[in-house]
Image (cartoon, rainbow, N blue to C red):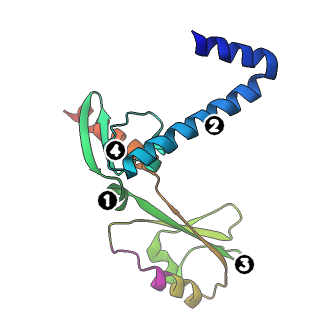
Amino acid sequence: FQAEDGIRDSVASRGLGDVYKRQVELRKDMWDVVKKLNEDGVTIILTTHYIEEAEELSDRVAVINDGKIILVDEKDKLIKKLGEKTIKIELFESVKKINGNLSKYNFILDQTNKIISHTYNLNSNTTDVTELLNDVKKDGYEIKDINTEQSSLEEIFIKLIKENNNELVRN
């Protein structure tokens, strides 16, 4: 009850913004302690619904769906096996239609018609980024900027749960 009283007193004297800020600080401090313990060789079993925390703190991850463990793996291996990467290429001029050398990459064109995106599996060797960039140049486009995004553990988790639920429905 003391903690509740302390929070209530904080709300009354400083407002909700200060209380929230303090809760965030306390949570960060707690995770710093957990990281330090882990670095010192202590095994930590963490259950969380905050997947970004699991991604930051964990070496190994277990995915549980409907009370059953559907996968256990090292976090980095899991991301490499099941993750995807998206390369976004911003061009100086608009693309009217994706054709020529670029048609083999299944590019998606954004609303401005200046950014083309290609998503590929990190585990497969189907996309040669050097070849892809050379093909952009061969088709006469000048590259303004390049950005890459990698699947988060949360995106992989959602994909696994959907696949598992679809499998449960089929059975």
- Whether the residues at callouts 3 and 2 have beta carbons within 8 Å, the answer is no
Q: Amino acid at mark 4?
A: Leu
Q: Is residue 111 found left or right of 121 in the rendered image? A: right
- Which of the 4 image quarters holds residue 49? top left
Question: Tag 3 or tag 1, which sits nearer the N-term?
Answer: 1
Q: Is residue 26 above or below residue 83?
A: above
What residue does disc 1 label?
77
Q: Nearer the viewer, residue 26 or 121?
A: 26
Task: State the CA–CA distance, disc 3 to disc 2.
Answer: 46 Å
Secondary element at image label 2: helix
Furthest toward the top, the residue is 1
Is 115 drawn above or below residue 74 in the view shown? Answer: below
- Callout 1, which amino acid? Lys
Among the 4 quarters of the image, the one containing residue 43: top left
Residue 129 among magenta residues: yes
Which mark is nearer the camera, 1 or 2? 2
Label 2: which residue? 25
How far apart marks 4 and 1 lie (CA) works out to 15 Å
Q: Does residue 169 appear to the left or right of 147 in the view shown? A: left
Q: Which residue is mark 3?
A: 93
Number of other residues with Cα within 10 Å of mark 1, as a class: few under 14, some 14 to 19, many 20 or more:
few
Name the residue located 56 percent from the left edge and 35 percent from the top edge.
27
Q: Describe the element under mark 4 as helix, strand or loop.
A: helix
Marked residue nearer the N-terminal end (4 or 2): 2
Find the residue positioned furthest to the front. 40
What range is drawn magenta here? 125-132
Q: Which mark is residue 160?
A: 4
